[in-house]
Amino acid sequence: MSGLFVELKTPHSGKYMQPTGLFINNEFVKGVDGKTLEVINPSTEKVITSVHEATEKDVDIAVSAARKAFDGPWRKETPENRGKLLVKLADLFEKNLDLLAAVESLDNGKAISMAKADIGMCVGCLRYYGGWADKITGKVIDTTPDTFNYIRKEPVGVCGQTIPWNFPLLMRPVSPPGVVNVISGFGKIAGAALASHMDVDKVAFTGSTVVGRTVLKAAASSNLKKVTLELGGKSPNIVFEDADIDNAISWVNFGIFFNSGQCCCAGSRIYVQEGIYDKFVQRFKERALKNVVSDPFARDTFQGPLVSQVQFDRVMSYIKAGKDAGAKVEIGGERKGDKGYFIEPTIFSNISEEMSIMQEEIFGPVCSISKFKTKDEVIAVANKSNYGLAAAVHTKNLNTAIDMPFGGYKESGIGRELGEAALDNYLQTKSVSIRLGNALFA
C-alpha cells in the first residue's frame, strides 16, 4: 500500500488522505506498467497530484476480479444483504458529505454548493436502489395444464462503466472483493479495452456521441455485449408568453449555467415567444450577469471553471465560431481572468438554426436565444436536432406543455437511467418450463 495515498488539503474540509492507486479486488494497487497521470486543479491550472494510470493489462486484472466475484460469493449473497450494503454506503456518503463534495470541487471546479447537492443526490440514489434489491421479481405464465412456466430476472454478468468527468464521484467502495473495481485511465486505452473485452457482458458509457459510436462498434465486434449509452444533448428550453417570466428566467439561467454548462441535458437552445422576447432577453441578461463566476470554494460561487484546458479551448472555439457566423453576443463571450479555465456566462442572439452553436453540443456556459411565433413552429425547430435527451417548457397551460417529448431519443443514447427502468439494463430474462406429467390443478 506504500505510495498509494497522498495527503491533500481542500479549503472546505481540511486535510485528508487521497488514494492514488487503482481500486481492484478491494484494495488499492499500482498500475502494472507503473504509469501515472496528473490531476490538474482547473481553478489554478496547477497539479493537485498524480494517480496511477490503467492500461489494457489493468483492465484484464479488474475484469478477472469481477468475474471471480460474480461466479463466487456475490452470487450467493441474499438480495436483502445486498440492499443493506447499498444503504450502508449511502450512510457513509452522508456522514462524509463535506469531504466528498470538497474533493469533487477540487478535482473538477464545481461550485461547492453544487457538489454538496450532487453528493446528496447520490445518497438518495443509493438508498432508492437499496430498496429495490429484494423486489426484483419474475412472473408465472399460464399456458397449458401440464406445464409450469415462469420467467425470472437474472443479472447480466460483469459490467463495465465509463464514468463521465462532469459528475464524478470519488469514493472507496464498500463491498466483497471484486464486486466493485475502480480504475483511472484514458478512454482511448482503458476505456477501449473495456468496451472490447471478451469477458465483459455489458458496458455503459456516458459521454460524447462520437465516442459512443466507437464504444458501440467495439461491443459489437467483440462479444456482442449489451450496451447502454448516455450521450450528448442540445436541449431546447421553450418559454411561452403565458409563462411566469421571473420563474422561467430563474430556471433557464440554472438550466444552462449550472455546472458551467457541463451537463448533457443543459438547456442550450432557448426559444422565447415573440410577445415577451425583448423583455425576456433583457431580464435574462441581467440575471446571468449576477451569476458569481469564481473560486468554487467561495461561498457565493455559482459557476466555477471548466474542467480542463482541452474543454476550455473547445468551448472558446465554439464562441469564436458563433461570432464568425454573425451571431450577436448579448453578454460574455470571453475568458474570465487570466488564471484557471473560467469562461464568462455567454448568451448569443441573432442566430440561425444552421449555425454550429445551435446544432452541436458545446458543453460549456454558452447558450443561444431565438424568437418564435406559434406552438407548431417551435416544436418543429426544437426537434430539428440530431439529439433528443431533454427538453423544458415554461407555460401555465398544461395542454401546451404535454406536447413536448422528454428522454434519450435519436443520437442522445440507448437505454434509460434511474428509476425502475434502469434495472432492465442490467437484467436479462430467463424462461423456465417444467413439464408436470399427469399432474392436475384445480
Image (cartoon, grey):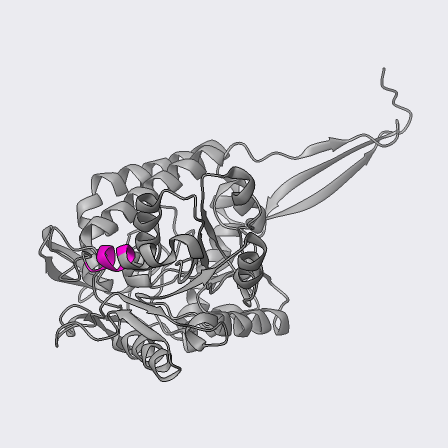
Is 42 in the magenta? no
Decide which of 75, 143 is in the foreground and name it: 143
Task: Assign the C terminus to one quadrant of the image.
Answer: top right
- Horizontal side of 94 relative to 161 (left or right) equals left
- Horizontal side of 401 relative to 434 (left or right) equals left
- The segment highlighted magenta reads 283-289
Secondary structure mostly taken by the magenta-highlighted segment of the chain:
helix
Taking the view exactly as shown, the residue that stands out farthest to the bottom is 324
Residue drawn at the location 50% of the way across and 74% of the way down:
210
Q: Position of residue 92 (x, y in %)?
A: 26, 40
Residue 366 versus residue 240 in the image, above or below: below
Taking the view exactly as shown, the residue that stands out farthest to the front is 275
Taking the view exactly as shown, the residue that stands out farthest to the top is 442
- Horizontal side of 25 relative to 437 (left or right) equals left
Q: Position of residue 297 (x, y in %)?
A: 13, 56
Can I make out residue 174 in this image?
no
Figure quadrant of residue 109 = bottom left
Can I make out residue 382 in this image?
yes
Residue 289 versus residue 130 in the image, above or below: below
Q: Position of residue 239 (x, y in %)?
A: 43, 51
Q: How many marks do you count on the picture?
A: 0
Residue 77 versus residue 314 in the image, above or below: above
Decide which of 357, 364 is in the foreground and name it: 357
- Horizontal side of 21 relative to 182 (left or right) equals left
Residue drawn at the location 54% of the way across and 32% of the way down:
135
Task: Assign the N terminus to one quadrant of the image.
Answer: bottom left
Residue 306 versus residue 409 in the image, above or below: below
Q: Position of residue 49 (x, y in %)?
A: 17, 70
